[in-house]
């Protein structure tokens, strides 16, 4: 009787219907649309975001995933992963090769990277803020239009974060990149590695690597218009158009934006009436952007050209304890970026040539202040030029990818002090060789992956440097997915032209004897997931050396020297939960212990040894809830940042910046009318009107809002 009962239970369990959902991605982590998913009775397809939802499944089903240009995959219904990776394959016809897309070297363990999709980008109004809430990176700026927005791994500096545009570096040598220079509307997706794991290596990758992937024309005759208005005089208009004509496609984008940014803030305690609010004046920003992305495919060749231009006018009010020294100061200028990529496809092989030209022109004017502060008068011009070339050979097999390449770069710096009639000119060159190998092996329900990469670079001025990375990963898939992995790598950052050669005023002087900064890092992690729900724990450790610090010398000049060393430990807890398919929750908590490990030239600990690193919080917490009901989307984000020290000696508690928390909300609804669609969106930031600072004497805005209307036309 018991045997019959168990047999009945088993048979009945095979017939019970259930649902499953997930995402289908390529090897780069990009979504794949229109994948056909079938069993013996039904047929489903994935949407534009690679999302699929399967219903009426039984445990006895086997699901078949198929799309032209990719290898097929099969899964038992009870063992379908939440994220399915399809590998690209070539379809060879006479005289032609059809490819799904350029098969970049597969990055082992996508779970080590944070991927921001097009859908998430459409729910945001600020690029740097979005990345900060989706990752561990800390924002060094605010969400006001035109404000400088840079990101850093806790304990690292913003210049240690490498920003790439379609794999090409945007940072100037040894400098941070301002993410406000890249409009949200030109971005297709973003991939973030918080452990400096760029396969090709680069001299700025001590911290994180952010790879921004730009939009291309996905279909014929697609146009988009955006208009925004909001707090502090915000006005923004953008227009884009995309089209495909046979084997040629292009995407064009332009925008104009302006804001006064005149928010209220709490003044410094030494001012009169510290409880009263003051207005942040002389903070106007005006920006114009232009972007072109064009692509031509011809048989086995592919040619891609991109142009990115920004013209800006920014007033810089300065710190609130010295407003009179920077009254009406302003920065004007423009930047231009040209990128040319040529690909040659040959079955399993590919040859890639990347050429780039970047140039920034700026003018700083601080001659509008009162004549009693004439010692602070400044009128300077600067021009930074960067030329780069990159040649790659790539080989792709089912379980093995290999990339080998050469990289050369030339940088030129020019600074002119118009008042003092002094010019500074300098240039710098590097040449390097790099290689990466990715191995993958599946054993029934298990998968083992390994990524190895290294780069050898000759910096001429500073000698030779070698950076490398080892990244193993193990996955087990059956009902739930268990993942174990880690990485170990090193990196370095070269001194900037500013650090080396600055002579722009009577307060600071560069140091040509500086050495590159270095870092050694490792991380281990584990993750358990099922049906888009997951738990993850990670521990990372970093040792930084030769950190450049500006100090005041005996001549009362500020001068940079290689003085600091640091040790950073981080514990990360992450969770994701999907409630009934329309409500999703994600969160992560980082506990950070960042300590100064500086020593004297004689090897003795300095007085700062063991102190906490300045402007590095003890913890940061990010929580996000997303509600989707048909065409209605609601997003709520909670962010809390722990207290931070502002001085290295840390003698008195009043030198701490207090913890703060922020709550941001957004709501949008999309309505389709034939070939048109309209999407109104409202953003409400810092809804509880918190008064806070990221840096001392640099206040951030309280409650602010933005309303946006998006109108699209596409020929179906």
Image (cartoon, rainbow, N blue to C red):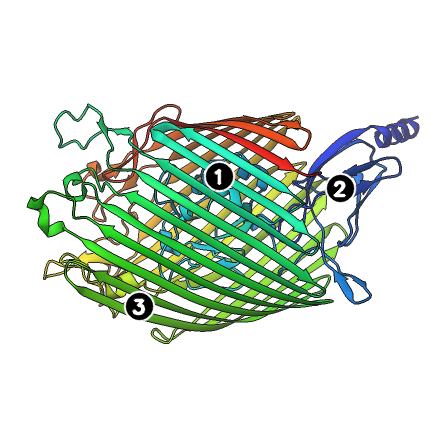
Query: What residue sits 65% from the left and 40% below the top?
Result: 49
Residue 439 falls in which quadrant of the image? bottom right
Residue 122 falls in which quadrant of the image? top right
Query: For mark 2, does the 10 Å Cα neighbourhood hold few (<14), some (14 to 19), or many (20 or more) residues?
Result: some
Residue tagged by mark 1?
238
Q: How far apart are the two marked residues, 2 and 3, measured between alpha carbons? A: 53 Å
Question: Measured from the top left, where is residue 489 in percent x and y?
Answer: 48, 61
Q: Considering the numbered disc 2 on the image, is that residue within a helix, a strand or a loop? A: helix
Query: For mark 1, does the 10 Å Cα neighbourhood hold few (<14), some (14 to 19), or many (20 or more) residues?
Result: many
Q: Is residue 189 visible?
A: no
Residue tagged by mark 2?
79
Query: For mark 3, does the 10 Å Cα neighbourhood hold few (<14), some (14 to 19), or many (20 or more) residues?
Result: some
Question: Measured from the top left, where is residue 502 in percent x and y?
Answer: 23, 62
Q: How far apart are the two marked residues, 2 and 1, measured between alpha carbons? A: 45 Å
Q: How far apart are the two marked residues, 3 and 1, measured between alpha carbons? A: 44 Å
Question: Measured from the top left, where is residue 679 in percent x and y?
Answer: 57, 29
């Amino acid at each position: 009787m018991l045997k019959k009962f168990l047999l009945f239970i088993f048979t009945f369990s095979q017939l019970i219907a259930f649902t499953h959902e997930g995402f289908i991605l390529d090897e780069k982590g990009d979504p794949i649309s229109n994948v056909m998913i079938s069993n013996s009775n039904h047929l489903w397809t994935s949407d534009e975001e690679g999302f699929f939802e399967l219903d009426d499944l039984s445990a006895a089903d086997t699901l078949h995933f198929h799309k032209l240009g990719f290898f097929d995959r099969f899964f038992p219904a009870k063992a379908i992963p939440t994220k399915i990776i399809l590998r690209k394959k070539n379809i060879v016809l006479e005289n032609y090769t059809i490819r799904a897309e350029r098969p970049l070297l597969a990055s082992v363990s996508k779970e080590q990277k944070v991927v921001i999709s097009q859908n998430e980008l459409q729910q945001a109004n600020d690029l740097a803020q979005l990345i900060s809430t989706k990752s561990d990176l800390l924002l060094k700026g605010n969400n006001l239009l035109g404000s400088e927005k840079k990101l850093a791994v806790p304990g690292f500096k913003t210049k240690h974060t490498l920003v790439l545009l379609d794999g090409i570096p945007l940072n100037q040598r040894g400098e941070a990149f301002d993410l406000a220079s890249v409009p949200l509307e030109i971005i297709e997706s973003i991939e973030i590695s918080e452990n400096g794991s760029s396969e090709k290596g680069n001299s700025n990758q001590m911290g994180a690597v952010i790879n921004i992937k730009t939009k291309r024309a996905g279909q014929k005759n697609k146009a988009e218009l955006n208009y925004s208005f909001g707090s502090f005089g915000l006005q923004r208009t953008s227009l884009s158009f995309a089209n495909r004509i046979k084997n040629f496609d292009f995407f064009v984008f332009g925008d104009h934006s302006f804001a006064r940014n005149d928010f209220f803030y709490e003044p410094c305690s030494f001012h009169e009436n510290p409880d009263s609010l003051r207005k942040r004046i002389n903070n106007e920003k005006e920006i114009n952007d232009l972007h072109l992305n064009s692509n031509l495919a011809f048989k086995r060749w592919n040619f891609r050209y991109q142009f990115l231009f920004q013209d800006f006018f920014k007033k810089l009010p300065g710190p609130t304890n010295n407003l009179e020294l920077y009254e009406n100061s302003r920065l004007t200028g423009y930047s231009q970026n040209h990128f040319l990529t040529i690909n040659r496809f040959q079955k399993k092989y590919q040859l890639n040539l990347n050429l780039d030209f970047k140039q920034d022109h700026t003018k700083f004017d601080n001659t509008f202040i009162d004549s009693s502060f004439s010692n602070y008068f400044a009128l300077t011009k600067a021009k930074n030029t960067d030329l780069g070339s990159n040649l790659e050979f790539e080989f792709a097999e089912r379980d093995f990818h290999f990339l080998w390449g050469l990289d050369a770069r030339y940088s030129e710096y020019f600074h002119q002090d118009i008042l003092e009639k002094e010019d500074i000119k300098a240039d710098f060159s590097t040449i390097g060789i790099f290689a990466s190998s990715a191995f993958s092996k599946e054993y029934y329900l298990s998968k083992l992956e390994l990524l190895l990469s290294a780069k050898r670079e000759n910096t001429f001025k500073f000698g030779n440097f070698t950076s490398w990375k080892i990244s193993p990963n193990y996955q087990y898939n059956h009902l739930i997915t268990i993942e174990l992995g880690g990485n170990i790598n090193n990196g370095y950052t070269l001194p900037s032209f500013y650090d080396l050669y600055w002579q722009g005023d009577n307060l600071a002087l560069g140091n040509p004897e500086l050495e590159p900064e270095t870092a050694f890092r490792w991380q281990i992690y584990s993750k358990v997931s099922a049906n888009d729900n997951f738990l993850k724990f990670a521990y990372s450790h970093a040792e930084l050396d030769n950190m450049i610090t500006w100090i005041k010398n005996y001549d009362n000049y500020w001068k940079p020297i290689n003085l600091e060393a640091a040790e950073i430990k981080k514990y990360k807890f992450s969770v994701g939960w999907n409630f009934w398919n329309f409500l999703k929750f994600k969160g992560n908590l980082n506990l950070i212990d960042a300590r100064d490990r500086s020593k004297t030239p004689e090897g003795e600990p300095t007085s700062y040894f063991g102190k906490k690193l300045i402007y590095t919080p003890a913890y940061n917490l990010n929580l996000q809830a997303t509600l989707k009901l048909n065409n209605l989307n609601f997003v709520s984000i909670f962010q809390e940042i722990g207290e931070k020290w502002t001085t290295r000696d840390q003698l008195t508690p009043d030198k701490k910046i207090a913890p703060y928390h922020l709550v941001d909300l957004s709501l949008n609804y999309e309505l389709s009318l034939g070939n048109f669609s309209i999407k109104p969106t409202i953003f409400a930031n810092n809804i509880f009107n918190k008064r806070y600072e990221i840096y001392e004497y640099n206040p951030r805005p309280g409650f602010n809002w933005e309303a946006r209307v998006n109108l699209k036309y596409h020929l179906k």
